[in-house]
Amino acid sequence: MKKLFTNLNFQVIAGILLGVIVGYYFPSFGPTANVISKTFIKLITMLIAPIIFFTIVLGISGMSDLKKVGRVGGKALLYFEIVSTLALVIGVIVANVLKPGAGFVRGHTGDASKLAVYQKAAAEMHWGDFLAHIVPGNVFEAFAQGDILQILFFAILFGFGLSLMGNAGQPVISLFDKLSKVFFNIMRIVMRVAPLGAFGGMAFTISTYGIKTLKPLALLMGSVYLTTLFFIFVVLNIICRIYKFSLWQYLKFIREEILIVFGTSSSESVLPLMMEKMEKFGCSKSVVGLVIPAGYSFNLDGTTIYLSMSVIFLAQVFHLPLTLFQQMTIIGILMITSKGAAGVTGSGFIILTSTLAAIKIIPVEGVAILLGVDRFMSEARAITNMIGNGIATIVIAKNEGEFSEAAEQHLIQE
């Protein structure tokens, strides 16, 4: 019994259930619960920048062939584009088949007052600037703001520079290796309060939005969850079979991370943990260091499913039948705009608003309808994003011959 109570999985599940009960019966606790959830996520995010930096630098400096870095990065981006485009297409097809917005009563328009914030942010987004934003104007500012893309870019250059020093760079590599271990030790300490973070996140969601807000948009929610499950257990499972590893064993291995993401609604809350777990699963440090951080910016399978389904849902709500050409246009625009979701606060709504503004078919005001239930769908998005990034890392590692089958077998036997 003692072993059960000290198990992190059990503690996180207990935190989630307690959060639902407290949020439902004590809604006034919502603001406090939000503080608890945000504090836990801040504890994690303070570790993300140094862990990404040290992991990438150590991975690249350990590569004997520097051309390999470009090859791994190129393969990762190609994989991201293919799989996320597939996620978009599946989202559009399911939304057309299930028609979640067909019977929607438009009287439930959500909180339109919040919409102005997203409209303003969408209007300010320029996709050329997004590409230029990858290069940090100030390295220290990139670390201070925790900008994953900018840290990734600088770390790759730093790793290249360090590897060119040869043996003279060994003292720096040795120091970075020790510092990396320190940060992972801090992360293990922080993870002890993960059940509290999951409790706060769930209590805030239930107390703020209430279970009753689900009813008008239950069909959309159900459709999104169904589609993400289909994507994980069919599409990603096929990819796993092609590359000869078990989806079930992989999911079992990251079950703690799945529960934490479900409780906090944030895939970033487990980013450092996922990097460590993927190394233990058998992927090399160099591949993990490149693919996981890049995946958090460019491989957002759950987000792309949500965006594509939301656009079709709103078209159905406003009784706007979209032609096949219009739907293909939407997919094309989302392929571009969804890549800008990285590093943008409130990214889901900003990207959705900017997409609606670009296609000029569906009223942008329709986004307000989704405001009330977006939080309830964020778990599905975040979990799918996280699972997809882990699988992408294994696929690239296996493709590069940078995967230890012995490590995977050892974990299966445990």
Image (spheres, helix red, strand yellow):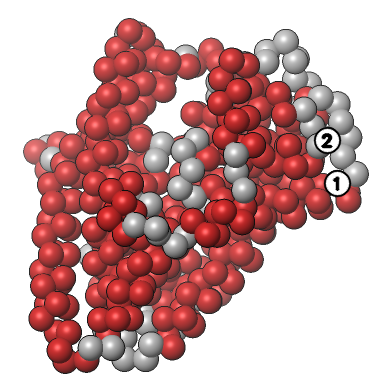
Quarter of the image for the C terminus: give it.
Answer: bottom left
Q: Is the residue marked by circle 2 packed among few (<14), some (14-19), or many (20+) residues within 10 Å?
A: few
What residue do we see at 29% from left, 38% from top? 41
Q: What residue did someone put label 1 on?
A: 326
Where residue 69 appears, as percent x and y from the top left, is: 41, 81
- Regarding mark 2 in the picture, which secondary structure is present there? loop
Q: Between residues 52 and 215, which one lies in front from this camera angle?
A: 52
Image: 168 above or below 349 = below
Question: In the image, what residue type sits under mark 1?
Answer: Gln
Residue 361: assigned label: 2
The answer to whether residue 240 is seen in the rendering is: yes
Where residue 40 appears, as percent x and y from the top left, is: 25, 36
Q: Between residues 133 and 27, which one lies in front from this camera angle?
A: 133
What residue do we see at 49% from left, 50% from top? 342
Quarter of the image for the N terminus: give it.
Answer: top left
Where residue 207 appears, as percent x and y from the top left, is: 39, 14
Name the residue at the front extreme.
137
Question: In the image, what residue type sits under mark 2?
Answer: Ile
Residue 296: assigned label: none
State if disc 1 and disc 2 touch (CB < 8 Å).
Answer: yes
